[in-house]
Amino acid sequence: MYRMNVQFISKRDKILREATKLITKKGISDSPMSQIAKKAGVAVGTIYHYFKSKEEIINEIYVSIRKNVGDVIIESSKNKVDLKEAFKSVSLGIYNYYITNPIEYSFLKQLEHSPIITSENHAVCELYFSPIFGSYQKAIEANLFINMDLMLMGMLTYNNIITLVELRLKSGELSAEIVDQAIEFSWRGITNQKNI
């Protein structure tokens, strides 16, 4: 019984892993279930044993990657008392995660605005970023951050990290100084300078 469970998990994980790679490389429409099955080394029927559709696979991968980023946020902000230190640590954490996992980053980028991702799963993914929004809200209330819409603030700071990731993946190299400058730029853009 135990061996069957291990086999069940490993086949399922392999399907998800290979689907991630294939969809990232070929796109959604050029990644039929037959190709996913071939890459994963399983029969098409085996995939349907675990997943109802390609859309279900895509949603699961998307949520899983977002959860990984959420874990990075929590881990990066752990034991950080100073607000700026926490901000820098989280920004670096997300940046390093994406450049270390370029396939996951490309998958997210491709599916970010896709109607395939359900509204329920978008809502689940938002929860993974709630620690950031919570800290931003507290900083606004303490007059340490400028009074700005939280979603806008979150998107501006996140997109700054994405710009760094894009530069790094295209050039193959990015100095620590440039990364630090970009994070400092974001920090100054949201802080109430006279109070911090």
Image (spheres, rainbow, N blue to C red):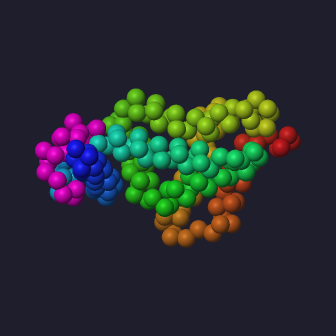
In front: 176, or 66?
A: 66
Task: Where is residue 139? Give x, y as percent.
Answer: 74, 35
| Camera sees residue 52 | yes
Please state if 77 lies on the left or on the right of 60 as rendered: right
Picture quadrant of residue 17: bottom left
- Quarter of the N terminus within the rendering: top left
Nearer the observer, 117 or 130: 130
- Residue 50 lies within the magenta run: yes
Quadrant hosting residue 55: top left
148 up-or-down from 2: above or below: above
Where in the figure is residue 177, as x and y percent of width and height? 68, 66
What's the magenta region? 39-56
Question: In this picture, is 101 found above or below 133?
Answer: below
Residue at figure coordinates x 28%, y 38% from the top left: 56
Q: Residue at the right extreme?
A: 194
Residue at figure coordinates x 48%, y 66% from the top left: 170
Closer-to-camera residue (108/135)? 135
User: Farthest residue in the front direction?
Assistant: 1
Question: So how many labels did they put on this image?
Answer: 0
130 left or right of 137 in image: left
Q: Position of residue 29 (x, y in %)?
A: 24, 48
Dominant SS type (magenta): helix
Q: Nearer the viewer, residue 4 or 60?
A: 4
Residue 62 location in percent, x, y?
39, 43
Residue drawn at point x = 85 percent, y = 40 percent: 195
- Residue drawn 68% across the image and 36% down it: 136
The image quadrant where one finds the C terminus is top right
Q: Is residue 11 magenta?
A: no
Say whether residue 35 is visible.
Answer: no
Position of residue 173 in the picture relative to residue 10 (left or right):
right
